[in-house]
Image: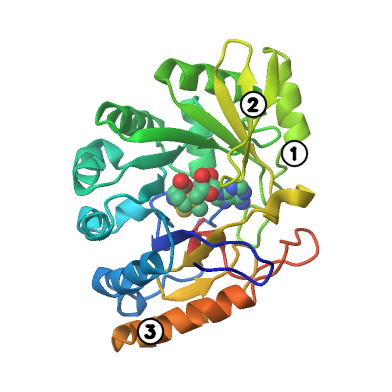
Amino acid sequence: MLIDAYGRAVDYLRVSVTERCNFRCLYCMPDKPLSWVPHSEILRYEEMILFVRAAIDCGVNKVRITGGEPTVRGNLDYFIKMIADYAPNIDLAMTTNGFLLGDLAAALKNAGLKRVNISLDSLKRETAGKIANRDILDRVLKGIEAAISVGLQTKINCVPMKGINDGEICDIIERCRAWGVSVRFIEYMDNTRAHKRLRGMRSDEILEAIASRYEFAEIERDLKSPSRLFALKEGYIFGLIEPHREEFCASCNRARLTAEGLLAPCLYYDEALSIKSRLRSGDVAGAVAVFREVLANKREKNRFGQERSERAFYETGG
Ligand code: SAM
Ligand code: SF4
Protein backbone atom coordinates (compact mmCIF):
# COMPACT_ATOMS: atom_id res chain seq x y z
CA MET A 1 0.00 0.00 0.00
CA LEU A 2 1.16 3.56 -0.70
CA ILE A 3 0.84 6.05 2.14
CA ASP A 4 1.74 9.73 1.95
CA ALA A 5 3.40 11.93 4.56
CA TYR A 6 0.04 12.68 6.22
CA GLY A 7 -1.11 9.06 6.46
CA ARG A 8 -3.42 9.22 3.44
CA ALA A 9 -3.57 6.00 1.39
CA VAL A 10 -2.82 6.71 -2.27
CA ASP A 11 -4.70 4.30 -4.51
CA TYR A 12 -5.64 6.55 -7.45
CA LEU A 13 -3.30 7.39 -10.32
CA ARG A 14 -4.16 9.97 -12.96
CA VAL A 15 -2.18 9.51 -16.17
CA SER A 16 -1.91 12.36 -18.64
CA VAL A 17 -1.21 10.93 -22.09
CA THR A 18 -0.75 14.33 -23.74
CA GLU A 19 -0.73 18.01 -22.85
CA ARG A 20 -2.10 18.86 -26.30
CA CYS A 21 -5.72 19.70 -26.94
CA ASN A 22 -8.16 20.46 -29.75
CA PHE A 23 -9.95 23.09 -27.55
CA ARG A 24 -8.67 26.27 -25.95
CA CYS A 25 -10.97 26.59 -22.94
CA LEU A 26 -10.92 30.04 -21.36
CA TYR A 27 -10.21 28.58 -17.91
CA CYS A 28 -7.45 26.24 -19.02
CA MET A 29 -5.35 27.08 -22.05
CA PRO A 30 -4.32 30.28 -23.83
CA ASP A 31 -5.09 30.51 -27.53
CA LYS A 32 -1.42 30.00 -28.29
CA PRO A 33 0.08 27.62 -25.70
CA LEU A 34 3.65 28.72 -24.94
CA SER A 35 5.05 25.65 -26.68
CA TRP A 36 4.24 21.97 -27.05
CA VAL A 37 6.61 19.41 -25.64
CA PRO A 38 8.25 17.67 -28.63
CA HIS A 39 6.98 14.13 -29.27
CA SER A 40 10.42 12.67 -28.49
CA GLU A 41 10.07 13.96 -24.90
CA ILE A 42 6.66 12.37 -24.35
CA LEU A 43 6.59 8.89 -22.83
CA ARG A 44 5.60 6.14 -25.22
CA TYR A 45 2.65 3.98 -24.12
CA GLU A 46 5.08 1.08 -23.62
CA GLU A 47 7.00 3.25 -21.13
CA MET A 48 3.91 4.52 -19.33
CA ILE A 49 2.51 1.04 -18.88
CA LEU A 50 5.66 -0.05 -17.01
CA PHE A 51 4.85 2.50 -14.33
CA VAL A 52 1.08 1.95 -14.36
CA ARG A 53 1.57 -1.79 -13.76
CA ALA A 54 4.04 -1.13 -10.94
CA ALA A 55 1.66 1.37 -9.33
CA ILE A 56 -1.15 -1.21 -9.50
CA ASP A 57 1.16 -3.76 -7.87
CA CYS A 58 1.72 -1.20 -5.06
CA GLY A 59 -2.03 -0.88 -4.40
CA VAL A 60 -3.39 1.58 -6.98
CA ASN A 61 -6.90 0.42 -7.87
CA LYS A 62 -8.16 3.39 -9.88
CA VAL A 63 -6.52 4.79 -13.02
CA ARG A 64 -7.86 7.81 -14.87
CA ILE A 65 -6.58 8.76 -18.31
CA THR A 66 -6.54 12.50 -18.84
CA GLY A 67 -4.62 15.36 -20.44
CA GLY A 68 -4.69 17.89 -22.22
CA GLU A 69 -7.23 16.05 -24.29
CA PRO A 70 -6.48 12.32 -24.15
CA THR A 71 -8.43 11.46 -27.30
CA VAL A 72 -6.14 13.54 -29.53
CA ARG A 73 -3.33 11.05 -28.91
CA GLY A 74 -3.42 8.19 -31.43
CA ASN A 75 -4.04 4.54 -30.49
CA LEU A 76 -5.52 5.36 -27.11
CA ASP A 77 -7.50 2.10 -27.18
CA TYR A 78 -4.18 0.22 -27.35
CA PHE A 79 -3.01 1.87 -24.11
CA ILE A 80 -6.37 1.32 -22.39
CA LYS A 81 -6.26 -2.35 -23.39
CA MET A 82 -2.77 -2.76 -21.95
CA ILE A 83 -4.03 -1.48 -18.59
CA ALA A 84 -7.29 -3.47 -18.69
CA ASP A 85 -5.50 -6.69 -19.66
CA TYR A 86 -3.12 -6.30 -16.72
CA ALA A 87 -5.79 -5.42 -14.15
CA PRO A 88 -9.32 -6.09 -15.41
CA ASN A 89 -10.90 -5.31 -12.04
CA ILE A 90 -9.55 -1.82 -11.43
CA ASP A 91 -11.67 1.27 -11.92
CA LEU A 92 -10.46 2.45 -15.35
CA ALA A 93 -11.77 5.89 -16.29
CA MET A 94 -11.05 8.85 -18.58
CA THR A 95 -11.75 12.59 -18.52
CA THR A 96 -12.38 14.05 -21.97
CA ASN A 97 -13.90 17.02 -23.74
CA GLY A 98 -16.01 14.53 -25.73
CA PHE A 99 -15.35 16.05 -29.17
CA LEU A 100 -13.88 12.86 -30.66
CA LEU A 101 -15.91 10.37 -28.63
CA GLY A 102 -18.52 9.87 -31.35
CA ASP A 103 -15.82 8.03 -33.33
CA LEU A 104 -13.91 6.50 -30.42
CA ALA A 105 -16.39 5.51 -27.71
CA ALA A 106 -17.04 1.96 -28.94
CA ALA A 107 -13.34 1.14 -29.41
CA LEU A 108 -12.44 2.54 -25.98
CA LYS A 109 -15.23 0.58 -24.31
CA ASN A 110 -14.15 -2.60 -26.12
CA ALA A 111 -10.58 -1.99 -24.99
CA GLY A 112 -11.70 -2.03 -21.34
CA LEU A 113 -12.54 1.57 -20.44
CA LYS A 114 -15.33 1.59 -17.85
CA ARG A 115 -16.16 5.23 -17.13
CA VAL A 116 -15.91 8.68 -18.70
CA ASN A 117 -16.25 12.18 -17.33
CA ILE A 118 -17.14 14.53 -20.17
CA SER A 119 -16.88 18.32 -19.92
CA LEU A 120 -20.00 20.28 -20.84
CA ASP A 121 -20.09 23.92 -19.80
CA SER A 122 -22.97 25.17 -21.92
CA LEU A 123 -25.91 23.93 -23.95
CA LYS A 124 -25.84 27.06 -26.12
CA ARG A 125 -23.78 26.72 -29.26
CA GLU A 126 -22.43 30.26 -29.08
CA THR A 127 -21.51 30.12 -25.39
CA ALA A 128 -19.92 26.67 -25.66
CA GLY A 129 -17.96 27.98 -28.66
CA LYS A 130 -16.86 31.06 -26.76
CA ILE A 131 -15.62 28.98 -23.81
CA ALA A 132 -13.73 26.43 -25.93
CA ASN A 133 -12.70 28.95 -28.58
CA ARG A 134 -14.02 26.51 -31.20
CA ASP A 135 -17.45 25.58 -32.57
CA ILE A 136 -17.81 22.40 -30.55
CA LEU A 137 -21.27 21.85 -29.13
CA ASP A 138 -22.85 19.51 -31.73
CA ARG A 139 -19.93 17.10 -31.66
CA VAL A 140 -19.64 17.15 -27.88
CA LEU A 141 -23.34 16.29 -27.55
CA LYS A 142 -22.89 13.45 -30.06
CA GLY A 143 -19.85 12.29 -28.07
CA ILE A 144 -21.85 12.21 -24.83
CA GLU A 145 -24.65 10.27 -26.49
CA ALA A 146 -22.16 7.81 -28.02
CA ALA A 147 -20.55 7.20 -24.62
CA ILE A 148 -23.93 6.51 -23.05
CA SER A 149 -25.09 4.29 -25.89
CA VAL A 150 -22.00 2.03 -25.86
CA GLY A 151 -22.45 1.53 -22.11
CA LEU A 152 -19.65 3.67 -20.67
CA GLN A 153 -20.65 4.90 -17.21
CA THR A 154 -20.84 8.63 -17.87
CA LYS A 155 -20.64 11.76 -15.74
CA ILE A 156 -20.62 15.38 -16.86
CA ASN A 157 -18.18 18.02 -15.57
CA CYS A 158 -19.23 21.68 -15.68
CA VAL A 159 -17.29 24.78 -14.58
CA PRO A 160 -19.76 27.64 -13.87
CA MET A 161 -18.43 31.14 -14.60
CA LYS A 162 -20.08 34.44 -13.83
CA GLY A 163 -21.47 36.27 -16.84
CA ILE A 164 -20.75 33.32 -19.14
CA ASN A 165 -22.68 30.15 -18.27
CA ASP A 166 -24.02 31.00 -14.79
CA GLY A 167 -27.59 31.14 -16.10
CA GLU A 168 -27.43 27.56 -17.41
CA ILE A 169 -26.79 25.54 -14.26
CA CYS A 170 -30.37 24.28 -13.91
CA ASP A 171 -30.69 23.63 -17.66
CA ILE A 172 -27.58 21.48 -17.52
CA ILE A 173 -29.05 19.54 -14.59
CA GLU A 174 -32.24 19.02 -16.62
CA ARG A 175 -30.33 17.76 -19.65
CA CYS A 176 -28.19 15.42 -17.57
CA ARG A 177 -31.28 14.11 -15.84
CA ALA A 178 -32.83 13.37 -19.22
CA TRP A 179 -29.66 11.48 -20.22
CA GLY A 180 -29.67 9.64 -16.88
CA VAL A 181 -26.16 10.84 -15.98
CA SER A 182 -24.87 12.75 -12.98
CA VAL A 183 -23.28 16.21 -13.27
CA ARG A 184 -20.49 17.58 -11.09
CA PHE A 185 -20.08 21.33 -10.88
CA ILE A 186 -16.42 22.29 -10.39
CA GLU A 187 -15.39 25.58 -8.81
CA TYR A 188 -13.20 27.51 -11.22
CA MET A 189 -9.57 27.36 -10.07
CA ASP A 190 -7.45 30.34 -10.86
CA ASN A 191 -4.26 29.46 -12.72
CA THR A 192 -1.49 31.07 -14.74
CA ARG A 193 -2.80 30.03 -18.17
CA ALA A 194 -6.45 30.96 -17.72
CA HIS A 195 -8.05 33.99 -19.35
CA LYS A 196 -7.33 36.88 -17.01
CA ARG A 197 -10.75 38.28 -16.23
CA LEU A 198 -12.64 35.06 -15.49
CA ARG A 199 -14.81 35.01 -12.39
CA GLY A 200 -15.76 31.53 -11.29
CA MET A 201 -18.76 30.76 -9.12
CA ARG A 202 -18.09 29.49 -5.61
CA SER A 203 -20.03 26.50 -4.33
CA ASP A 204 -22.51 28.54 -2.26
CA GLU A 205 -23.37 30.57 -5.38
CA ILE A 206 -23.82 27.40 -7.44
CA LEU A 207 -26.11 25.91 -4.78
CA GLU A 208 -28.07 29.17 -4.63
CA ALA A 209 -28.66 29.03 -8.38
CA ILE A 210 -29.87 25.42 -8.09
CA ALA A 211 -32.13 26.33 -5.16
CA SER A 212 -33.94 28.84 -7.39
CA ARG A 213 -35.51 25.91 -9.26
CA TYR A 214 -35.17 22.79 -7.12
CA GLU A 215 -35.45 21.50 -3.59
CA PHE A 216 -32.43 19.39 -2.67
CA ALA A 217 -30.46 18.09 0.28
CA GLU A 218 -26.87 17.03 0.83
CA ILE A 219 -26.40 13.26 1.01
CA GLU A 220 -23.56 11.09 2.24
CA ARG A 221 -20.51 11.38 0.01
CA ASP A 222 -18.19 8.68 -1.22
CA LEU A 223 -15.11 9.30 0.90
CA LYS A 224 -12.86 8.31 -2.00
CA SER A 225 -14.26 11.03 -4.25
CA PRO A 226 -13.52 14.76 -3.94
CA SER A 227 -17.14 15.49 -4.70
CA ARG A 228 -19.86 16.52 -2.21
CA LEU A 229 -23.17 14.98 -3.27
CA PHE A 230 -26.69 16.37 -3.28
CA ALA A 231 -30.05 14.81 -4.17
CA LEU A 232 -32.94 16.71 -5.71
CA LYS A 233 -36.33 16.00 -4.15
CA GLU A 234 -37.08 14.01 -7.32
CA GLY A 235 -34.07 11.77 -6.57
CA TYR A 236 -31.53 12.99 -9.14
CA ILE A 237 -28.01 13.23 -7.68
CA PHE A 238 -25.49 15.93 -8.56
CA GLY A 239 -22.02 16.71 -7.21
CA LEU A 240 -19.95 19.73 -6.26
CA ILE A 241 -16.16 19.89 -6.35
CA GLU A 242 -14.81 22.63 -4.11
CA PRO A 243 -11.03 22.84 -4.15
CA HIS A 244 -11.26 26.11 -2.21
CA ARG A 245 -12.91 24.39 0.72
CA GLU A 246 -10.73 23.93 3.78
CA GLU A 247 -11.24 20.14 4.10
CA PHE A 248 -10.86 19.42 0.37
CA CYS A 249 -7.43 17.77 0.67
CA ALA A 250 -8.06 15.72 3.82
CA SER A 251 -9.12 12.63 1.89
CA CYS A 252 -6.88 13.12 -1.16
CA ASN A 253 -5.87 9.71 -2.54
CA ARG A 254 -4.33 10.87 -5.82
CA ALA A 255 -1.01 11.10 -7.60
CA ARG A 256 -0.32 12.13 -11.17
CA LEU A 257 1.96 10.99 -14.00
CA THR A 258 2.41 13.59 -16.74
CA ALA A 259 2.95 12.78 -20.40
CA GLU A 260 6.54 13.92 -20.00
CA GLY A 261 7.16 11.47 -17.19
CA LEU A 262 6.87 13.75 -14.16
CA LEU A 263 5.30 12.37 -10.99
CA ALA A 264 3.31 15.14 -9.35
CA PRO A 265 1.72 14.79 -5.89
CA CYS A 266 -0.80 17.61 -6.46
CA LEU A 267 -2.34 19.54 -9.36
CA TYR A 268 -1.58 22.92 -7.87
CA TYR A 269 2.18 23.01 -7.36
CA ASP A 270 5.26 22.81 -9.54
CA GLU A 271 6.68 20.11 -7.27
CA ALA A 272 7.30 16.93 -9.26
CA LEU A 273 10.08 14.43 -9.96
CA SER A 274 10.86 12.85 -13.31
CA ILE A 275 10.85 9.09 -13.85
CA LYS A 276 11.40 9.37 -17.59
CA SER A 277 15.02 8.24 -17.65
CA ARG A 278 14.23 5.35 -15.33
CA LEU A 279 11.34 4.15 -17.48
CA ARG A 280 13.41 4.58 -20.65
CA SER A 281 16.14 2.36 -19.21
CA GLY A 282 13.62 -0.17 -17.84
CA ASP A 283 14.43 0.66 -14.20
CA VAL A 284 10.91 0.16 -12.84
CA ALA A 285 12.09 -0.36 -9.23
CA GLY A 286 13.87 3.02 -9.47
CA ALA A 287 10.66 4.65 -10.73
CA VAL A 288 8.72 3.18 -7.79
CA ALA A 289 11.35 4.51 -5.38
CA VAL A 290 10.84 8.00 -6.86
CA PHE A 291 7.08 7.54 -6.50
CA ARG A 292 7.47 6.79 -2.79
CA GLU A 293 9.71 9.86 -2.41
CA VAL A 294 7.12 12.07 -4.12
CA LEU A 295 4.39 10.81 -1.79
CA ALA A 296 6.61 11.23 1.26
CA ASN A 297 6.91 14.91 0.34
CA LYS A 298 3.28 15.49 -0.58
CA ARG A 299 1.88 18.58 1.12
CA GLU A 300 -1.03 18.46 3.46
CA LYS A 301 -3.18 20.98 1.60
CA ASN A 302 -3.39 22.96 -1.58
CA ARG A 303 -2.95 26.65 -0.89
CA PHE A 304 -5.05 28.51 -3.38
CA GLY A 305 -4.55 32.24 -3.35
CA GLN A 306 -1.21 31.96 -1.55
CA GLU A 307 0.89 30.21 -4.19
CA ARG A 308 0.49 29.65 -7.90
CA SER A 309 1.87 26.80 -9.93
CA GLU A 310 3.74 27.76 -13.08
CA ARG A 311 2.86 24.37 -14.53
CA ALA A 312 -0.52 24.53 -16.26
CA PHE A 313 -3.34 22.13 -15.38
CA TYR A 314 -3.34 20.83 -18.95
CA GLU A 315 0.34 19.96 -18.57
CA THR A 316 -0.08 18.15 -15.26
CA GLY A 317 -3.33 16.48 -16.29
CA GLY A 318 -6.50 17.99 -14.89
N1 SAM B 1 -9.52 17.77 -21.87
C1 SAM B 1 -10.27 17.01 -20.93
C2 SAM B 1 -11.51 17.75 -20.48
O1 SAM B 1 -11.60 18.94 -20.74
O2 SAM B 1 -12.37 17.13 -19.86
C3 SAM B 1 -9.44 16.55 -19.74
C4 SAM B 1 -8.50 17.51 -19.14
S1 SAM B 1 -9.25 18.89 -18.33
C5 SAM B 1 -7.86 19.75 -17.74
C6 SAM B 1 -9.99 18.10 -16.93
C7 SAM B 1 -11.11 18.85 -16.26
O3 SAM B 1 -10.56 19.98 -15.64
C8 SAM B 1 -12.22 19.33 -17.16
O4 SAM B 1 -13.47 18.91 -16.66
C9 SAM B 1 -12.12 20.83 -17.11
O5 SAM B 1 -13.38 21.44 -17.21
C10 SAM B 1 -11.48 21.04 -15.75
N2 SAM B 1 -10.73 22.28 -15.64
C11 SAM B 1 -9.74 22.73 -16.44
N3 SAM B 1 -9.27 23.93 -16.00
C12 SAM B 1 -10.01 24.24 -14.92
C13 SAM B 1 -10.03 25.35 -14.03
N4 SAM B 1 -9.22 26.38 -14.19
N5 SAM B 1 -10.90 25.35 -13.00
C14 SAM B 1 -11.75 24.30 -12.84
N6 SAM B 1 -11.78 23.22 -13.64
C15 SAM B 1 -10.93 23.18 -14.67
FE1 SF4 C 1 -8.52 21.17 -23.49
FE2 SF4 C 1 -9.73 20.07 -21.40
FE3 SF4 C 1 -8.16 22.25 -21.12
FE4 SF4 C 1 -10.48 22.51 -22.35
S1 SF4 C 1 -10.19 21.89 -20.19
S2 SF4 C 1 -8.49 23.33 -23.08
S3 SF4 C 1 -10.69 20.58 -23.37
S4 SF4 C 1 -7.51 20.24 -21.71
The tag on residue 202 is 1
Residue bearing the label numbered 2:
230
Q: Are there few (<14), some (14-19), or many (20+) residues within 10 Å of tag 2?
A: some
Q: Quadrant of residue 67?
A: bottom left
Determine contact: label 2, label 3, CB under 8 Å.
no
| Residue 244 visible at all | no
The tag on residue 42 is none
Residue shown at the point (52%, 16%) measured from the top left = 174
Residue 305 in percent (x, y) is at 79, 59
- Which amino acid, mark 1? Arg
Residue bearing the label numbered 3:
285
Position of 52 relative to 31 (above/below): below
The secondary element bearing badge 2 is classed as strand
The secondary element bearing badge 3 is classed as helix
- Which amino acid, mark 2? Phe
Determine contact: label 2, label 1, CB under 8 Å.
no
Position of 164 relative to 309 (above/below): above
Whole-angstrom CA distance, mark 2 to mark 3, is 43 Å
Q: Quadrant of residue 218?
A: top right
Residue 76 in percent (x, y) is at 25, 56
Query: How many discs mark residues in the rendered view?
Result: 3
